[in-house]
Amino acid sequence: MIPDLRHDFNRRQFRPDAYRGMLRSLDAVARAHVAFPIAETPCFFPKSLLDEMAQIGADLTHRLIGDPAYLARSLAAIPEAWRAADQDAHPHFLTVDFGLVREVNGHLAPRLVEMQAFPSIFGFQWVLGEAYRSAFGLQPSLRYLLGGLDEAAYWKFLERVIVAGHDPDTVVLTDVAPAMQKTLPDFNITADRLGIRIVDIADLSPGDPTGPRFGRAPRLCYRNGRRRVPIRRIYNRAIVDELVRKEIRLQFDYRESFDVEWAGHPNWYFHISKFSLPFLDHPAVPPAVFLSDWFGGGRTGPLRDRLPADRSRWILKPLYSFAGQGIVFAPTDEQLSAIPPTQRSSYLLQERVTFQPVIETPEGPTQAEIRILYVWPDRGPLTPLISLVRLGRGKMMGVDHNKGQSWVGASAGYFLP
């Protein structure tokens, strides 16, 4: 999108051997094989575009956080078994995904794809930004950290939100079988940098290893050899959808109050999610309705009118799935009616964002989905830290829709200050 930088990289800077060396270096730094595709190229965006997306994401988030009626409705929509106790005032993490569309005046503009109050791969994305620069000799003036941050400030933000002044030995990063996750490279980088532990969420157990309770609530603990260590803070990477699908049996109840802090309280994953989209009236947000409301409003009522007349531009999404699971393009009446009425409130009909292929590559024009990653420290502002880019030429940006292709996958977004 910055033509001279784009052309220079394609014609002069890219070398297959440098790319292969970069992949090896990523595996080495992450202490694990990076199993998801890494694109052959970084991306170059105007700083004004990244700033615009970061501001839109912050504005939409503050709008939702500041709406008590919305928060009450989204809380009621959380499955009762997963409605965690001791919710804090705001999420600690936020990701907001955008595609770029061509407006009638010919200008490119961001459109919201999805937003989620959940952490992303902050550690790995920083390493990837450094790796592209080193492998291909990118000019030193290019930046990939937002808000004028440097490396020290970036990690200081993450330490402030994740560790929050506690002994790192009492801070755990939890997920479902973390050693088997594709995001293990990010887990390792984060744990190495911050000195925290990676623990399977199924191994967390309630109880106080010293006997009496600390305060008015029990602790959660993890086991380090024979020692049970009390946990002060949980960097939560576990997704409820995966816990349910895999029938993971936890040793604690989300609904019980524990003497522990959440870095990423589980409820926020539901509050700010696809569930939010029908409540947002903004030029950058494609229209969306709950499937239950669409049926309840009839086939010709105002809810139907929120969606484009062309059904090929519709998309059906389950609210609480992850990584594009369960999405149906151009759903038919039969497909919509096949969803039982009791489940329709857990599905969303949305206008599909048609990405413009704005990244020129040797394999042809390629689409970019741009994710802005934020942190929100206690007693601090919501702050964008970095962008994450996914390149693709398939129907969707995920791996399954871009199999067998090159110059697609995870990338980094650079800009000139």
Image (tube, grey):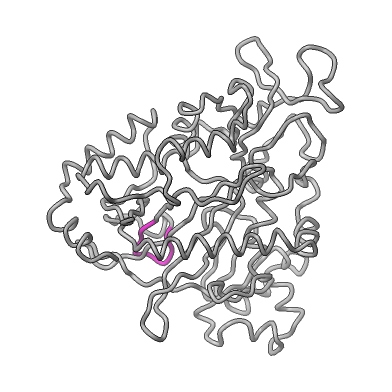
- The structure residue drawn at horizontal position 42% and vertical position 55%, both measured from the top left corner, is 400
Depth order, front residue of 96/344? 96
Residue extending farthest left: 12
In the image, residue 340 sits, relative to residue 180, either above or below, namely below
Q: Main secondary structure of the magenta part?
A: loop
Whether residue 87 sits left or right of residue 10 in the image: it is right
- The structure residue drawn at horizontal position 37% and vertical position 34%, both measured from the top left corner, is 33
- The structure residue drawn at horizontal position 48% and vertical position 43%, both measured from the top left corner, is 121
Whether residue 317 sits left or right of residue 397 in the image: it is right
Locate the C terminus and report the quarter of the image it occupies: bottom left
Magenta stretch contains residue 103: no
Residue 149 x %, y %: 43, 45
Quadrant in the picture for residue 35: top left
Depth order, front residue of 44/117? 44
Locate the N terminus and report the quarter of the image it occupies: bottom left
Residue 221 x %, y %: 70, 22
- The structure residue drawn at horizontal position 47% and vertical position 42%, both measured from the top left corner, is 122
Residue 239 x %, y %: 62, 45
Whether residue 5 sits left or right of residue 355 in the image: it is left
Whether residue 386 sits left or right of residue 207 in the image: it is left
Residue 293 x %, y %: 74, 75
Residue extending farthest right: 216
Tell me the magenta residue range: 390-397
In the image, residue 1 sits, relative to residue 233, either above or below, namely below
